[in-house]
Amino acid sequence: MNQKIRVVVGLSGGVDSSVTAHLLKEQGYEVIGMFMKNWHDESVTISNDCPWMEDSTDAMLVAEKLGIPFQAIDLSEEYRTRIVDYMFAEYKAGRTPNPDILCNREIKFDIFLKAAQKLKADFVATGHYCQKGEIKVDGKPVYQLLAGADPNKDQSYFLCQLNQEQLSKALFPIGHLQKPEVRRIAKEMDLITADKKDSQGLCFIGKVRLPDFLQQQLKPKKGDIVNVPDDLPEYESKKIPAGVSFEDLETSTLDAICLPQQYHASQGKKVGDHTGAHYFTVGQRKGLHVGGTGLPLFVISTDTTANIVYTGMGETHPGLLRKGLFVKADEIHWIREDLRLKVGETARYQARIRYRQPLTWATLLMKENGLYVLFDTPQKGIASGQFVAWYEGKESIGSGTIF
């Protein structure tokens, strides 16, 4: 390389981003390390479990060891407005947000990317376990978001909201490696992060006591836990009529199958109390503190207006298992714009509704009002506000916020 290509690496103080910076330097890039400070409030983080000061110091020591320039950038204001406020609003509305996906779309590959471009960077790089491909469609370059080579660590789901512009500027240097190899490289390089545990919890905040975090704005409020029987007549409408293909279903039938069931207190029996419906999410089992039910109770719905948590007994309760979901038209995102479905079109993809969930086959039906996703096998704990991502083989094609 005559004119060195400049890459800004998001150095988080962890082993993955440390090795990312090392590999880029080895490949001949001009590398700058940048640490993002996104959180100030230590009162809700679990002590010593990912304090930003320790991470910032580790990131600086890695940069020093690798002989690359280093700087820290304070994005806490943007993080609060784009991620934290969004989380509070979603929980208040009884939905379950995914801050990690938003953090990648709004912080790492938007605000951070712009900060890197001010440093005249050609690319930004992160320690994500995913890979980038490039193909030509109609003579133009199209970027692919591909699964990481390590199936235990594949993080493509967290990047399912990136667009072509963001992908064009992104590098994922460890995506082809297995995690043990990454640690081995860090040890060989004698990097301080070699044996550091992987960070847990919220993107850039660390382990957080979620109720403590939410209680900053969402106050505890006592309400009823209502258990719903599994033979509720309304569940009949959620079944797909025998011998009818997905494509032939009426919109009213699709709505019955794919939209969340609305419950009212008279449909079940009170079995306990809770401290706030907004602290619970669909599919949750722990934290209900209701005993003597025989089978375990799972949250099947929350009503934050009436402050009721609805539960069902056992893992096969029809309120917990759903055959489909819906994504509103303005919430659909295509990484591969060239594969965008037109109204009336259908496609078969594999999909997941949470990180690390095995991919499962689904039929996507595009209608005027949005996208219906019908799974071949019922899915457990589909939660409004979470993201569904669909794949063709190893490639992430698109995603959307679950209604």
Image: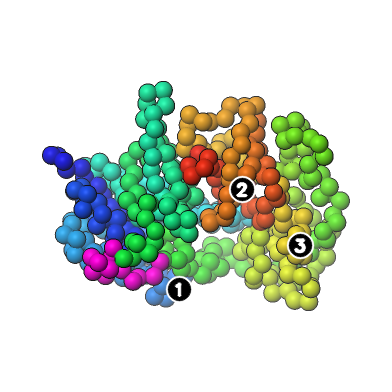
**Residue at mark 2:** 360
Q: Are marks 3 and 2 in contact (CB under 8 Å)?
A: no
Task: Indicate the quadrant containing the C terminus: top left, top right, bottom left or bottom right.
Answer: top right
Residue 38 seen: yes
Determine the residue located farthest toward the left in the rendered image. Answer: 2
Question: Going 79% across and 73% down the picture, which residue do you hit?
Answer: 294
Residue 312, label in figure: 3
Percent across and percent down for residue 286 are 64, 70
Mark pair 3, 1: CA separation? 32 Å
Left or right: 113 with respect to 249?
Answer: left
Q: Check disc 1 and report its element: helix, strand or loop.
A: loop
Kind of residue at disc 2 = Thr
Per the image, is 194 magenta?
A: yes
Name the residue at 63% across, 53% down.
383
Q: Which mark is residue 46?
A: 1
Q: Disc 2, disc 1: CB below 8 Å? A: no
Q: Main secondary structure of the magenta part?
A: loop
Hey, which quadrant is residue 280 in on the image? Answer: bottom right
Q: Nearer the viewer, residue 30 or 303?
A: 30
- 10 Å neighbourhood of mark 1: few (<14), some, or many (≥20)? few
Nearest-to-viewer mark from 2 and 1: 2
Q: Earlier in the sequence, mark 2 or mark 1?
A: 1
Q: Of marks 3 and 2, which one's residue comes earlier in the chain?
A: 3
Q: Check disc 3 and give the amino acid type.
A: Gly
Residue 287 in the magenta stretch? The answer is no
Instruction: Give the residue at the far top of this rendering.
Output: 138
User: Quadrant location of the N terminus?
Assistant: top left
**Magenta-drawn segment:** 185-198
Front of the two marks 3 and 1: 3
